[in-house]
Amino acid sequence: QVQLQESGPGLVKPSETLSLTCTVSGGSISTYFWSWMRLPPGKGLEWIGRIYSNGNTNYNPSLKSRVTISVDTSRNQFSLQLASVTAADTAVYYCARGEKIYCGGDCFDSWGQGTLVTVSS
Amino acid sequence: EIVLTQSPATLSLSPGERATLSCRASQSVSGYLAWYQQKPGQAPRLLIFDASNRATGIPARFSGSGSGTDFTLTISSVEPEDFAVYYCQQRINWPLTFGGGTKVEIK
């Protein structure tokens, strides 16, 4: 059974870049879509963007100017960078796998536990 | 972007009762709607995809229905482990969007 684990700093200063990595174990990162989501306090889930194992990406237009998602197939990892963060970017960040048989990668059948990132000086 | 509105925000039930959760879309999503369950401190779990199809390993007491703009998740008889937050998600248009969630709590 595939497992996902987010890692990265839990505290980021305003105007800096948030960087997170998702490590995939128990399965290959190849031939799947991999997404990042976030859950701000008191709000609903927000889809940030996704990457296919070949490196093709799609981003949420609301964040596109600040987001970069990359993949390292040799390490079975993919990463999120969010630039110029503010307090509004404080959230629990999740990585997830796109279900490919029925949803074409656009619903999510495996998730990481999530990691809280706080933006504060 | 498509806005998903879930109601009620909180549903207070006793074990054994029926739960009915609603998700309304700002425009038609056809049948491309999923439901997730999230318990405190845990990752979300896919329950239903494409409005009415249970994901692998999901008990039969969970069912989904609806199309277009109005969708329902029903738990036929709530078990103690079902108290959680439930989210809907559409995949007909990008960006993919989620509802604000319904918390099912113990009455």
Image (cartoon, coloured by chain):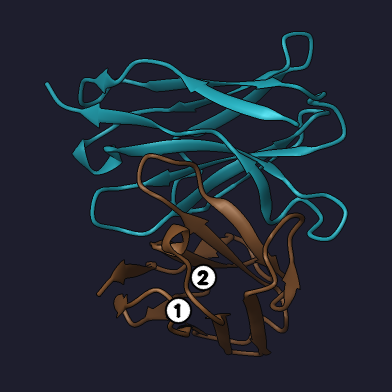
Chain colours: A cyan, B brown
Residue appearing at x 42%, y 62% in the figure: B80
Residue type, numbered disc 1: Gly
Farthest residue toward the left?
A: A121
Examine the image and state in which quarter residue B8 appears: bottom left
> Dividing the image into 4 quarters, which one contains the N terminus of chain A?
top right
Residue appearing at x 88%, y 54% in the figure: A101
B73 or B101, nearer to the observer: B73
Examine the image and state in which quarter residue B66 appears: bottom right
Q: Mark 2 belongs to which subunit?
A: B
Examine the image and state in which quarter residue A117 appears: top left
Provide residue A57's location: percent of width, then percent of height: 69, 38
B3 or B20, nearer to the observer: B20
Farthest residue toward the top?
A: A74
Provide residue A50's location: percent of width, then percent of height: 64, 41
| Residue A114 left/right relative to B107 | right
Provide residue A80's location: percent of width, then percent of height: 52, 27
Distance Cα–Cα, label 2 vs label 1: 37 Å
Label 2, residues with CA under 10 Å away: few <14, some 14-19, many ≥20: few
- Do marks 2 and 1 both belong to one polypeptide chain? yes
> Dividing the image into 4 quarters, which one contains the C terminus of chain A?
top left
Provide residue B1's location: percent of width, then percent of height: 51, 70
Q: Secondary structure at mark 1?
A: loop
| Residue B93 left/right relative to A43 | right
- Vertical side of B17 occupied by A1: above or below: above
- Vertical side of B85 occupied by A77: above or below: above
Residue type, numbered disc 2: Glu
* Residue that numbered label 2 is attached to: B1
Q: Is tag 2's residue or tag 1's residue first in the polypeptide sequence?
A: 2
Q: Secondary structure at mark 2?
A: loop
* Residue that numbered label 1 is attached to: B16
Residue appearing at x 48%, y 33% in the figure: A113
Residue contact at pointers 2 and 1, CB within 8 angstroms:
no
